[in-house]
Image (cartoon, helix red, strand yellow):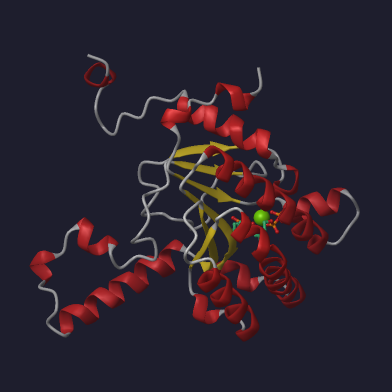
Amino acid sequence: MSFKEKIDSKRLPKHIAIIMDGNGRWAKQRGEFRVFGHENGVSSVREVSEACTELGIQYLTLYAFSTENWNRPKYEVTALMELLVKTIHSELKTLNENKIKLLAIGDIESLEENCKNELREAIQITAGNTGLNLVLALSYSSRWEITNAAKCLALEIKSGKIDPEQISQEVFEKFLNTSEMPDPELLIRTSGEYRISNFLLWQIAYAELYFTPKLWPDFRKEDLYEAIVDFQNRERRFGMTSEQLNP
Ligand code: IPE
Ligand code: IPE
Ligand code: MG
């Protein structure tokens, strides 16, 4: 029985987030430059987006470029940005055909002009699509997002729109980039690293974490199905006892 057949379609996670890691190592194993790994990672993005669309998942968030990734060698940063522009451009038709709505989180203003324009255009063109919400985390880091939220909230207080006494988790969340999205229920990281690397720290408070040694360019639909089956076999207790959940 394949993993897909084991999935209970009534208990799907609404939101899956993925830390797409291991492109550089994948390329190195083949005696190629790191960028070759990034290029091949695009096929995996296509695979998981298609799989999520077929399953009817509502949100898929992909960590594509972190705030810290700006510290990589300039040629790699440039190559990643060029790949992003090229991919958004070439995939736009497929996104629309599959009714995928493109969204972005992160410090989008910090991206280069052509990258920003390509992204904005694709977001606008796909805005009316009603299928999968495909969220790209670009120039994103959780500490940036939370600090930015605190700043925006402080400005609202300063201008008298919010009383500090009104601050609650719900109010604070409205200032995060993800304010319109449900929290991820399943977080996947590829490449065998057991860390979060500044990704969605607030939002994954109760997410199920799934780590796989597979390098991102090798990640296929079946790997996603396997992660979902694993997720569905877990008991999510949210602080309660097993007996409370199964009286
Ligand atoms: C993930 O692969 C892609 C980005 C972070 C942009 P890496 O480039 O981090 O690959 P490894 O971890 O060095 O193998
Ligand atoms: C995390 O991968 C960021 C993305 C996948 C975009 P990294 O490869 O940058 O993470 P660290 O630095 O090894 O933790
Ligand atoms: Mg990495």
Q: Is residue 96 above or below residue 52?
A: below
- x and y, in percent, of residue 197 in the image: 53, 55
Q: Which quarter of the figure has residue 114?
A: bottom right
In the image, residue 113 lies at what x, y percent?
61, 85
- Which quadrant of the rendered structure holds the C terminus? top left
Q: Quadrant of ligand 1?
A: bottom right
State the residue in front, 50 or 221: 50
Residue 70 position, x and y percent, is 62, 73
* Residue 93, quarter of the rendered image: bottom right
Q: Name the foreground residue: 199 vs 58.
A: 58
Q: Is residue 109 above or below residue 20?
A: below
Residue in view at x 48 percent, y 69 percent? 106
- Report x, y in % for residue 122: 58, 71
**Total number of numbered labels?**
0
Does 129 appear above or below 219? below
Closest to the observer, 7 or 230: 7
- Left or right of 144 in this view: 102: right
Q: Quadrant of the N terminus?
A: top right
Q: Residue sitting at 37 percent across and 49 percent down?
A: 183
Whether residue 35 sits left or right of residue 70 in the image: it is: right
Instruction: Residue at 48% x, 30% y: name it.
Output: 231
Q: Is residue 236 left or right of residue 127?
A: left
